Image: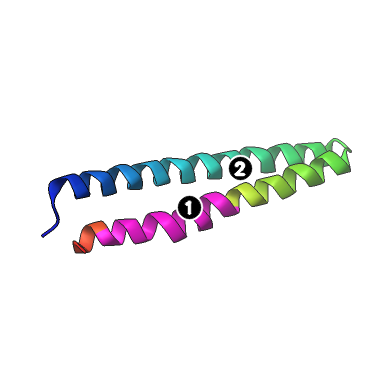
Amino acid sequence: MVELPAVAVEIAELVAVTLGAGAAAAGGVVLERFGLSAVTAGDLALGAWGIAMGLLALYVGVVALGYEQALPRLRRLTTGE
C-alpha cells in the first residue's frame, strides 16, 4: 500500500506537469495563430518563426509533457504502483 504523503506528492507532480503541458500547448496555439497572421500580412520571416516556435511549443506541451510525463504519472496513480 502506498503511504498518503507519497500519494500527495504524486498528485502535486501530476497537477504541475498537467498545468505545464496545458500552458505550453496554449502558447503553441497562440504562436501558430501569430505566425499565420504574419504570413498572411506578408512578413514571411516573422511568420515562419512564429509557426516554427508554435510547433515546438505544441510538441513540448502535448508530447513531451502530456504523453511522456503526465500519462505515466496518471497510470501510476490509478493502478496504485
**Foreground of the two, 54 or 12:** 12
Query: Mark 2 touching mark 1, by CB under 8 A?
Result: no
Closer to the camera in the image, 24 or 80: 80
Residue 40 place in picture, x, y as percent: 82, 40
**Under tag 1, what secondary structure?**
helix
Q: Quadrant of the C terminus?
A: bottom left
Q: Which residues are magenta?
A: 59-76
Q: Which residue is found at the position 83% from the left and 39% from the top?
A: 46
First reached walking from the N terminus: tag 2 or tag 1:
2
Q: Any mark on residue 29, and which?
A: 2
- Residue at which label 1 appears: 65
Give the quarter of the figure containing the N terminus: bottom left
Q: Is residue 24 left or right of residue 53?
A: left
Q: Position of residue 36 (x, y in %)?
A: 75, 42
Q: For the point 76% across and 37% down, which residue is it?
A: 37
Three-letter amino acid code of the residue under disc 2: Val
Distance from disc 2 to disc 1, alpha carbons, whole Å, reads 16 Å
Instruction: Look at 52% across and 56% down and name the residue there.
Output: 64
Residue 79 vs residue 34: left or right? Answer: left
Question: x, y percentage for residue 67?
Answer: 45, 59
Q: Nearer the viewer, residue 23 or 35?
A: 23
Q: Position of residue 78 (x, y in %)?
A: 22, 59
